[in-house]
Amino acid sequence: MARKTTSGPATDPELLILSSLAGGPKHGYAMMQEIGAFAGVDLGPGTLYTAITRLVEEGWIEPMEASGRQRPYRLTPGGLDYLRGQLEKMRQLASFGLRRLRTV
């Protein structure tokens, strides 16, 4: 199993995938392309599909009917709630850190 990145929440594969799927269903390659574009993070297939497996097991995303060799995934209502909560925590952390930097 691939290891999760330790670069921080902005590069957490699960949050990147959930953020991508918030825009609508996508297959793995489309997610990798979009994540590269919006986050500047190059998720390899091993990292991507390991994270997808974890997200499916948590019930935060679900596979859709395959179209040829490509299987799209979509965000579940629970995944949307989880993503919203994680992004709010990131906003609070960023706000706190930026306030602290103003005093330096």
Image (cartoon, rainbow, N blue to C red):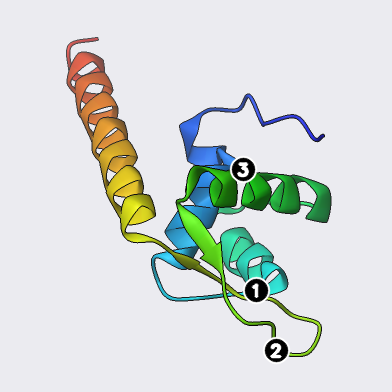
Q: Which mark is residue 70?
A: none
Relative to 48, 79 lies left or right: left
- The x and y percentages for residue 10 are 48, 39
SS class, disc 3: helix
Q: Amino acid at mark 1?
A: His
According to the picture, the residue beneath numbered tag 1 turns out to be: 27
Separation of disc 2 and disc 1 at Cα?
9 Å
Q: Is residue 69 left or right of residue 24?
A: right
In the rendered structure, find residue 54 and report the number of the disc placed on it. 3
Residue at 24% in and 38% down: 88
- Quadrant location of the N terminus in the rendered image: top right
Closest to the observer: 52 or 45?
52
Mark 2 / mark 1, whichever is N-terminal: 1
Q: Please state if 67 lies on the left or on the right of 2 as rendered.
A: left
**In the image, residue 91 lies at what x, y percent?**
25, 36
The numbered mark at residue 67 is: 2
**Dot 2 amino acid type:** Ser
Question: What is the quadrant of the C terminus in the image?
Answer: top left
Q: What distance separates the C-alpha of mark 1 from that of mark 3?
A: 16 Å
Q: Earlier in the sequence, mark 1 or mark 3?
A: 1
> CB atoms at circles 2 and 1 under 8 Å apart?
yes
Point 27% across, 39% down: residue: 85
Residue at left 45%, top 51%?
60
Can the viewer see residue 21 in this picture?
yes
Give the structural element (helix, strand or loop) at label 2: loop
Task: State whether residue 43 appears in this view.
Answer: no
Q: Is residue 44 above or below residue 72?
A: above
